[in-house]
Each structure stands twice: as C-alpha cells, then as structure tokens.
C-alpha cells in the first residue's frame, strides 16, 4: 500500500511522541517530519524507529497530506491553520479550535459522534482528554433525554501526570506527586469545561456540570466517575450504552467498574454504569476510563486522520 506522508508539530511532547509511535507502526502513514522547540536536534525512538526533531519553523507543511499539531494551547491552532493554507489537511490536538473556546464551526473530532463532519474534512479539532472520557459516557443519556432537567451532573476525574505535558513544573516532580492524590482546577475552573458545556448543550443538555479533576501519581490514564440524577429509573443501565455503541470498535461496555490498566496503551473508552442504592431520586453512576495519550489525544487524532484521508477508521490503532 502507498503510504501517505504526514508530519507532527510538537513531536517531542507527550502527545507528539505518542503520535510518532502510532504513525511509525501505521500501515498507511509515513512520518515525513517531526518538530520540537527546546528539544530540536535530538533523536528519540518511537514505534520502533528513530525520529529526529527539526525546528517547527523548518517544517515543510505543504509536502505532506496531513499535519498533526500537538503544540501548546495558544500556539497550536494557528499552526494547524497554516498547514491547511499550505495545502495539507490538519488535526489540531490543542483546545484552540474546539467548541466553547471562541472559534466555533470547526469540525470537532469526537469521532464516534461526529463521523459525518470528520470524513474528508480539511481541518479537525481533536477533543480534550477529559471531554473524550466524559462526553462519550454521557451522550447516550442526552440523546434519550434521560437526565432530569434540574439535575446537576457531578464529574470527579483523575488523570495521570502525562496529562500536564512534559515541560518542567515543580508541582509535577516525582517527589511532589508520588504517594499523593489531590484535586486541582477546583471550583469548576478547568479549561475543558467550556468545551464540555458547548457539546452538552449541542446534545440538548443545559444541566450544570460540576467537574473536579484530580492528579493521580501514575504516568497515563483517566478515570472519570460521573453521578447523574435521572428523569426516570433506568431498569437496565448498561442496555442504553450497548444500544448506542454496540458495534463501535473503540468503545467497550465493561462488566464492572473499569480500571486504568484495562485501557492503557489502547485507543478505547471503557464504560460501565450502575444505579445508586438508597437515593430519593433515580440516580446513576457512570465510570469511563481512557488512556489520555491514546484515545484522549494521539489515538483519536489518528482515528480522525484516517477518516480525513479516506483510510479505514481503525487502521494502525491499538485496541
Ligand atoms: N498530554 C495529554 O494528555 C494531552 C491530551 C489531549 C490534548 N493535549 C494537547 O496536545 C498538545 C500537546 O500537549 P503535550 O502534553 O504533548 O505537551 P508537551 O509535552 O508540553 O509538549 C509540547 C510540545 O510543543 C513544543 N513547544 C513548546 N513551546 C513551544 C513554542 N513556543 N513553539 C513551538 N513549539 C513549542 C514542545 O517542544 P520542546 O519540548 O522541544 O520544547 C513539545 O514538542 C497541547 O495543546 C495539549 O493541550 C494533550
């Protein structure tokens, strides 16, 4: 098969390295360039091959079919748009072009729910890691109008430390995170809320979202625990997710609460739900687990790129 050329901007970061590894093992894609900032000129192993980083300014954007932009928030979106101007397609992994962040109307790559707009698109905004886990868990409830209109949706989610990127920060030193567990972005202040609110609204839910992220002392993975008051009891909670996602290759309905080990290095979302006992109103607890660097970033970006380039959606993705 003739491989299509792709490039990665921000390839020395956590999401960018994961992209390089996936591309180097992908049967339909070939890595033409990989860029870095401080790490320009260094070489790493990714996906069983050596990858040498050039400066982002030196990237031949117009020579490839598609550019992945995994640069920091505030820089990444403009580079993705520059790639499109140069004649490539682009997937932006940052929040810059996502709904709720001031730039509406750009195809949002929550692939399972947005295939129609992603297929053949020139530019796609890849979802945040937390929104991927949380929106795919809630979407079937929104679609059926099952959330009580006055319900607050309470989301507690924990992420591994790669979620914060690999630029040095004191609070992310091993000595600070190891054997500890704490919340951050408290008081509904996390950047991903705007994106989740915009999508929930588009799916018909104006319910309050109360989102508290936590930092977990593991390298990768997100587990979200979501509590929702329902409009009516749901006798078989899992039937709803099975009906919505039954044939999806990257969504798994578990038989008990999912764990991070079950999703690590895989492009999957693993879901489970149960009714809460002893409540005055019907209340559901949903659990959603992903690998933040795969389904929450690079894997979903490749899933979208496959559709944009006319390849099979599952090609080159670990399940
Ligand atoms: N980490 C995750 O779980 C995750 C999940 C979903 C989405 N994302 C998004 O993906 C993007 C990358 O995240 P990350 O976690 O991989 O970040 P990261 O580890 O901090 O990597 C950032 C990348 O951008 C480069 N860079 C930094 N400042 C730059 C500048 N001023 N100009 C050009 N390049 C610059 C870095 O190069 P040097 O290291 O060589 O300086 C590195 O390659 C972000 O927008 C993030 O929001 C991340």
Image: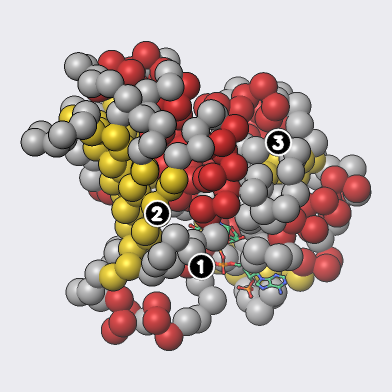
> Counting other residues with Cα less than 10 Å from the Cα at mark 1, is it few (<14), some (14-19), or many (20 or more)?
few
**Secondary structure of residue under mark 3:** loop
Rounded to the nearest angstrom, the CA distance separating label 2 from label 1 is 21 Å
Q: Nearer the viewer, mark 2 or mark 3?
A: 2
Could you tell me residue 70's position as x and y percent?
A: 64, 57
The relative height of residue 24 versus residue 163 in the rendered view (above or below) is above
Frontmost residue, 53 versus 200 = 200
Residue 165's disc number = 1
Residue 211's disc number = 2
In the orientation shown, which residue stands out farthest toward the left? 278
**Secondary structure of residue under mark 2:** strand
Residue at image location 70% in from the left, 27% down from the top = 117
Residue at image location 69% in from the left, 74% down from the top = 37
Q: Locate residue 48 relative to residue 279 in the image: left or right.
A: right
Pointer 2 or 1: first along the chain: 1
Could you tell me residue 287's position as x and y percent?
A: 28, 40
Image quarter where the C terminus lies is top left
The relative height of residue 133 versus residue 46 in the rendered view (above or below) is above
Residue 185 is drawn in which quadrant? bottom left
Q: Is residue 301 visible?
A: no
Q: Is residue 99 visible?
A: yes
To which residue does mark 3 refer? 107
Rounded to the nearest angstrom, the CA distance separating label 2 from label 3 is 24 Å
Frontmost residue, 162 versus 198 = 198
């Amino acid at each position: 098969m003739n491989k299509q050329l792709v490039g990665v901007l921000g390839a020395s970061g956590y999401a960018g390295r994961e992209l390089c590894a996936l591309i180097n093992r992908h049967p339909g894609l070939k890595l033409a360039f990989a860029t870095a900032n401080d790490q320009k000129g260094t070489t790493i192993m990714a996906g069983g091959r050596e990858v040498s980083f050039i400066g982002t300014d030196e990237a031949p954007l117009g020579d490839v079919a598609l550019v992945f932009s995994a640069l920091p928030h505030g820089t990444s979106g403009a580079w993705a748009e520059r790639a499109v101007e140069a004649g490539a397609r682009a997937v932006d992994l940052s929040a810059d072009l996502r709904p709720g962040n001031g730039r509406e109307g750009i195809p949002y790559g929550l692939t399972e729910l947005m295939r129609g707009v992603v297929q053949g698109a020139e530019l796609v905004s890849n979802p945040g890691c937390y929104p991927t886990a949380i929106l795919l868990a809630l979407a079937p409830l929104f679609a059926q109008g099952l959330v009580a209109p006055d319900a607050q949706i309470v989301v507690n989610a924990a992420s591994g430390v790669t979620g914060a990127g690999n630029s040095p920060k004191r609070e992310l030193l091993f000595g600070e995170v190891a054997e500890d567990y704490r919340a951050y972005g408290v008081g509904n202040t996390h950047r991903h809320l705007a994106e989740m609110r915009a999508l929930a609204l588009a799916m018909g839910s104006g319910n309050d979202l109360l989102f508290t992220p936590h930092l977990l002392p593991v390298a990768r993975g997100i587990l979200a625990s979501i509590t929702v008051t329902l409009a009516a009891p749901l006798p078989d909670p899992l039937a709803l997710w099975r009906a919505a996602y039954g044939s999806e290759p990257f969504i798994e309905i578990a038989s008990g609460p999912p764990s991070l080990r079950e999703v690590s290095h895989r492009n999957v979302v693993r879901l489970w739900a149960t009714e809460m006992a002893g409540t005055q109103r019907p209340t559901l607890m949903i659990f959603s687990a992903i690998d933040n660097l795969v389904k929450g970033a690079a894997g979903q970006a490749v899933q979208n790129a496959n559709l944009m380039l006319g390849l099979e959606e599952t090609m080159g993705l670990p399940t």
